[in-house]
Amino acid sequence: MDTYSVSSSVDGAIDYGATGVFATLQSIAFLLSTLVDSCPLHREFGLDPPIDDPTSYARASLSAQIIEKIERSIPEVDVVDVLIEDQPLEGKLSATVKVVITNDSEI
């Protein structure tokens, strides 16, 4: 099985005709860049970033939240690793997620 890496800091256009592995990776990138309550028909979708928490707690909280949301929303994917990088001068946390697609037949 191949391991794929998806970053939250990548800005790009949505490919509405995406299929297969690319569509799955695009779904993960979309989830990482979406805030909770911003999708009208699916309020639970997205992340709820720890805004005022200390960096060490924010990293742990965000990592756990990313794993939970990806495995709930995209069941054909297993999360292998989550790397949270902080950019203290900009006040940002960015995530890079490594995943394995476990069931190619669902894609």
Image: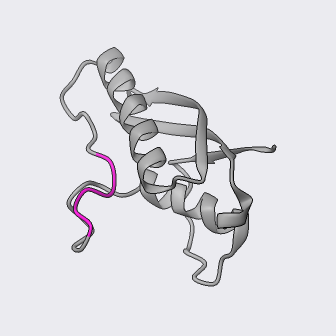
**Residue located farthest toward the right when viewing the structure as drawn:** 1
Q: In which quarter of the image is residue 34?
A: bottom left
Horizontal side of residue 67 vs 18, given as left or right = left
Locate residue 100 relative to residue 85 in the image: left or right: right
Give the x, y percent position of residue 72: 42, 49
Tell me residue 92's x, y (percent).
Answer: 37, 37
Query: Which SS does the magenta portion mostly show?
Result: loop
The residue shown at (71%, 69%) is 20
Say whether residue 43 is magenta. yes
Q: Residue 99's quadrant in the figure? A: top right
Horizontal and vertical percent for residue 35?
29, 55
Rendered view: 47 above or below 105: above
Indicate the quadrant containing the C terminus: top left, top right, bottom left or bottom right: bottom right
Residue 28 x/y as whole percent = 53, 55
For the point 71% across and 62% down, which residue is it? 21
- Report how many numbered discs are placed on residues in the image: 0
The magenta segment is 42-47
Of 19 and 8, which appears nearest the observer?
A: 19
Give the colour scheme shown. Answer: one colour
* For residue 31, side relative to residue 6 (left or right): left
Quarter of the image that includes the N terminus: top right
Above or below, 49 against 55 in this view is: below
Which residue is at 18% across, 29% downward? 52
The answer to whether 14 is drawn above or below residue 105 in the figure is: below
